[in-house]
Every structure is written in structure tokens, then in C-alpha cells.
């Protein structure tokens, strides 16, 4: 028995230090590459159009082509496969789920959704607005249905929702969080019956959003993502936040603080849609100075 434990002790560090990428290099691992070193493994991560970014609201430009989205299949209950990956959990979405409109060039079919979170209840969103980092961030990933060109910088469309700490429990979100926690300790895969409309704000509340061109926020950081970051947030209670951030932190490296630091804008324009009805309160001070809001 002693020899088994000794063998496990020898193998354990090897598994942790796989030479792969990780979110934070402060983990006790000599070889995994934190965000500052991703470029050494994936050169594209050092590109000029990387994500996430800090959205500076006074520099956002109004774009009249950013019309409301048409959400397809978001109100249909589907059997969703929940897969545990090395550093996140993916909820695999059926192709019947998709979006059009929203200034996108054609229909995009949904592929998966996932969350980004912090540690011990601390903020863990990837994008920031005027420097503010939110509790968590939900990404619903889509890919273009039309034939794609070799280097299509619009190949993917990700809808991003900030999840903001609230005094009340969000029971709909529990469905996702419980599934995430179940695959952590009970195998790598499960399935749930699930409807997207149950966790995101009503479509009528989603006409306000930011838009910019960027990249995947994990290696290999391909710069082919049309980003949509909605004004309207999803509430989460402190206990829900803790349930994820503490449980996953206990699981080891790459399972907490699962967000990439913000990247340089490098001259890119961040646009916003026509509606400011649900703009965060802190942004209202910019109403009189921002071109976006002047046209509302
Ligand atoms: Zn993501």
C-alpha cells in the first residue's frame, strides 16, 4: 500500500505540470504557462486584436447598425450535455439554437456556453466596464453558418453577460451551477434539460450592448470573434458565488480565477447599440459626452 501512495505522489506533480497553459502562474507548477506566457506556446495570443478588454464607456461609439437580436431556440427546452474540460465546463448546445440580427452578418448557430469566475467570491468576469470587474461572466458561443472564408474574422460570435452579485438567490442559475459542481466530482460528463431563456434576461431587455472585434479568451486566441457584451446583467447571490468559486478552487490549478486579464485595445473601436435603457448606472454620467448616447 505504501508503494502505491509513493507512486501516486510521484505522478501527481507530473499531471499538474503538464507544460500546458494555465490561468495563473502562481500555482505551484514550474511548467504551466500563465496568461503572460501564453504567447510562447500560442503566438496568436500576442496579436493586436485580443480579448477580453476593458470597455471605456466615454470612448464607445454609437453604431446604428447594431439592431436587436433575433434569438432562435432560446425558449426551447433541450437536453444539454455538460462536459468537464481541463479548466472549465462546457454546456454543449444544439444547432437549432442560434442568433441573427444584432448587426451580425447572417445566422450563427450556438455551440456551447460556459462561465468565468473568481476565487472566494471575488470578481471573476473577463471583460470590465470602466475598470469594474463583475462577479462572473457567461459566454454563449456561436459559429457562423454561412460558408467561411480561409481567414474569416467573423467566424465566431460570442454573447457575453455579466453576472452581478445581488441580495437575492437566482434559482435559474442554480441549474447551471449545480451541474458544474456535479461534473467536478461525479465523472466528467452529465446532461440536463435546459432552456437558455431561463437564465438570460428577457429579449426585450437585451437591445443595449457593446460590440467589438476580438479573439477567443483562451489559447490559441484566434482573432475571429465578434463580441457582444450586454448592458443588462444577470443576478447571483453571494452564497451561489461562493459555491462555485470555493468548490472549484479546492479542485486545484486552473479551476479558480478562470479569467484572462484584459488586453490592449490597439486602436480598435468599441461600439454600442441604440438603446441605453439598461446601461449601468455608472455609465449614465457619460450620457452628455459620449457620441453613442448623444443620438439616443
Ligand atoms: Zn469564455
Image (cartoon, rainbow, N blue to C red):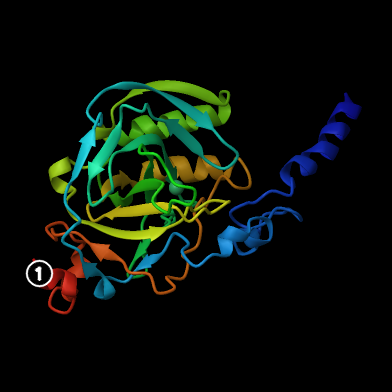
Q: Which residue is mark 1?
A: 295
Viewer-nearest residue: 237 or 54? 54
Q: What's the residue at 44%, 47% (across, down)?
A: 149
Percent coordinates x, y for residue 248 in the rendering: 54, 41
Spot the residue most to the right. Answer: 3
Percent coordinates x, y for residue 7 in the rendering: 87, 32
Kindly tell me whether residue 171 is visible in this rendering. Answer: no
Percent coordinates x, y for residue 81 in the rendering: 45, 24
Percent coordinates x, y for residue 275 in the rendering: 13, 58
> Ligand 1: does it lie within 8 Å of the C-beta at label 1?
no
What is the total number of numbered labels drawn onto the structure image? 1
Quadrant in which the C terminus appears? bottom left
Residue 144 sits in which quadrant?
top left
Reply above or below: 254 against 277: above
Q: What's the residue at 48%, 56% (across, down)?
A: 223
Q: Secondary structure at mark 1?
A: loop
**Side of 201 where 241 appears, left or right:** right
- Bin the neighbour count of mark 1 within 10 Å (Cα to Cα): few under 14, some 14-19, many 20 and up: few
Residue 122 sits in which quadrant?
bottom left
Viewer-nearest residue: 227 or 183? 227
Quadrant in which the N terminus appears? top right
Spot the residue most to the bottom. Answer: 289
Kindly tell me whether residue 131 is visible in this rendering. Answer: yes
Spot the residue most to the left. Answer: 296
Q: What's the residue at 35%, 33% (across, down)?
A: 174
Viewer-nearest residue: 53 or 149? 149
Reply above or below: 144 against 285: above
Amino acid at each position: 500500500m505504501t508503494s502505491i501512495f509513493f507512486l501516486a505522489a510521484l505522478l501527481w506533480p507530473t499531471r499538474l505540470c503538464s507544460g500546458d497553459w494555465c490561468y495563473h502562474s502562481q500555482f505551484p507548477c514550474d511548467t504551466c504557462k500563465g496568461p503572460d506566457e501564453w504567447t510562447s506556446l500560442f503566438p496568436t495570443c500576442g496579436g493586436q486584436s485580443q480579448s477580453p478588454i476593458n470597455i471605456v464607456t466615454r470612448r464607445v461609439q454609437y453604431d446604428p447598425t447594431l439592431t436587436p437580436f433575433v434569438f432562435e431556440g432560446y425558449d426551447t427546452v433541450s437536453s444539454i450535455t455538460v462536459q468537464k474540460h481541463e479548466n472549465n465546463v462546457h454546456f454543449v448546445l444544439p444547432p437549432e439554437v442560434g442568433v441573427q440580427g444584432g448587426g451580425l452578418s447572417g445566422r450563427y448557430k450556438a455551440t456551447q456556453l460556459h462561465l468565468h469566475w473568481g476565487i472566494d467570491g471575488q470578481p471573476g468576469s473577463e471583460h470590465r466596464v470602466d475598470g469594474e470587474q463583475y462577479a462572473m461572466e457567461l459566454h454563449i458561443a456561436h459559429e457562423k453558418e454561412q460558408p467561411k472564408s480561409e481567414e474569416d474574422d467573423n467566424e465566431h460570435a460570442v454573447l457575453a453577460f455579466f453576472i452581478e452579485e445581488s441580495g437575492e438567490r437566482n434559482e435559474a442559475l442554480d441549474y447551471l451551477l449545480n451541474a458544474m459542481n456535479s461534473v467536478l466530482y461525479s465523472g466528467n460528463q452529465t446532461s440536463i434539460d435546459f432552456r437558455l431563456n431561463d437564465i438570460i434576461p428577457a429579449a426585450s431587455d437585451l437591445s443595449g450592448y457593446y460590440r467589438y472585434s476580438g479573439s477567443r479568451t483562451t489559447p490559441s486566441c484566434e482573432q475571429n470573434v465578434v463580441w457582444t457584451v450586454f448592458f443588462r446583467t444577470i443576478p447571483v447571490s453571494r452564497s451561489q458565488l461562493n459555491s462555485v468559486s470555493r468548490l472549484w478552487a479546492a479542485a486545484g490549478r486552473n479551476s479558480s480565477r478562470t479569467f484572462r486579464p484584459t488586453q490592449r485595445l490597439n486602436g480598435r473601436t468599441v461600439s454600442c447599440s441604440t438603446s441605453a435603457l439598461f446601461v449601468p448606472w455608472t455609465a449614465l454620467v457619460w450620457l452628455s459626452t459620449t457620441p453613442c448616447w448623444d443620438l439616443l
